């Protein structure tokens, strides 16, 4: 089998990952509605304070969720939107600068990650920067290996402290109607674990 044939087989296998259903029999979640981005560990943000060049910094968010800046030292950044962090920095800087004008810019998004393990070409953690499906993650991981069963791909998620599990079936009936194929868009979210048996 040539390399191009193997790639075609892997892509064909990935494309077959179209039908999905939750393990409980209920439909899988759809792509969540977009909301304000929340800063997370490993993101890189730029803080600009108007007329205060000594404070301006491009800083990474540490694993503990904090950033370090002159005058205010450590400030919690993870979990906040850029506007919320700006408000926190304004409060902290008011002790040193009258009416500080602060800008927070997210320079690099590195925190929202999905782990994919099992029978994919390149298992590992992948950053998701836009709405992403199971099929997208499998494709980004190089597709299914020749040993992948393809019958079930499990998405494990913890939501509000409760473990959830969704199963995507790669054995698709090509004549399936749109409602079946619409369930292909099993959205992955930051923190998900995708298991390909």
Image (tube, rainbow, N blue to C red):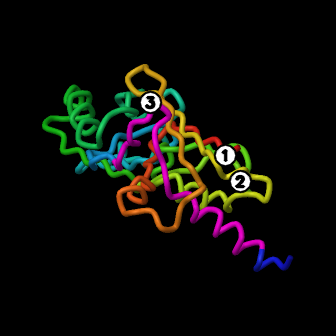
| Quadrant where the image shows the N terminus | bottom right
Mark 2–mark 3 CB contact (< 8 Å)? no
Q: Secondary structure at mark 3?
A: strand
- The residue located at (44%, 43%) in the rendering is 189
72 w.r.t. 176: above or below: above
Rendered location of residue 117, percent (x, y):
68, 43
Give the magenta part as a residue range. 6-31
Q: Is residue 86 left or right of residue 150?
A: left
Q: Is residue 176 visible?
A: yes
Q: Is residue 158 left or right of residue 35?
A: right
- The residue located at (25%, 39%) in the rendering is 86
Q: Is residue 17 magenta?
A: yes
Q: Secondary structure at mark 2?
A: loop
Report which residue position mark 2 lands on.
Answer: 120
Query: For the image shown, how many numbered marks are present on the structure?
Result: 3
Rendered location of residue 87, percent (x, y):
21, 35
Q: Secondary structure at mark 1?
A: strand
Rendered location of residue 90, percent (x, y):
21, 34
Rendered location of residue 38, percent (x, y):
34, 40
Q: How far apart are the alpha carbons under marks 3 and 1?
A: 34 Å
Determine crowd level at label 1: few under 14, some 14-19, many 20+ residues with C-alpha closer than 10 A: many
- The residue located at (42%, 55%) in the rendering is 185
* Residue found at the far right of this picture: 1
- The image's mark for residue 196 is 1
Report which residue position mark 3 lands on.
Answer: 66
Q: Nearer the viewer, residue 111 or 107?
A: 111
Q: Is residue 123 left or right of residue 44?
A: right
Q: Earlier in the sequence, mark 2 or mark 3?
A: 3
Q: Earlier in the sequence, mark 3 or mark 1?
A: 3
Q: Nearer the viewer, residue 144 or 74?
A: 144
């Amino acid at each position: 089998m040539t390399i191009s044939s193997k790639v075609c087989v892997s892509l064909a296998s990935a494309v077959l990952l179209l039908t999905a259903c939750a393990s409980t029999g209920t439909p899988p979640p759809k792509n969540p509605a977009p909301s304000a981005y929340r800063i997370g560990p490993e993101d890189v943000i730029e803080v600009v304070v108007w007329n205060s060049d000594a404070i301006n910094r491009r800083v990474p968010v540490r694993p503990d969720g904090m950033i370090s800046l002159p005058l205010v030292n450590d400030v919690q950044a993870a979990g906040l939107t850029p506007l919320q962090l700006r408000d926190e920095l304004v409060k902290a800087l008011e002790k040193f600068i009258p009416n500080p004008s602060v800008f927070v810019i997210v320079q690099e998004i590195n925190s929202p990650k999905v782990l994919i393990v099992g029978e994919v070409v390149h298992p590992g953690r992948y950053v998701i920067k836009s709405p992403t499906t199971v099929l997208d993650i499998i494709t980004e991981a190089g597709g299914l290996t020749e040993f992948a069963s393809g019958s079930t791909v499990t998405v494990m998620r913890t939501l509000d402290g409760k473990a959830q599990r969704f199963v995507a079936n790669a054995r698709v009936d090509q004549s399936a109607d749109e409602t079946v194929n619409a369930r292909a868009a099993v959205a992955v979210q930051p923190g998900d674990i995708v298991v390909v048996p």
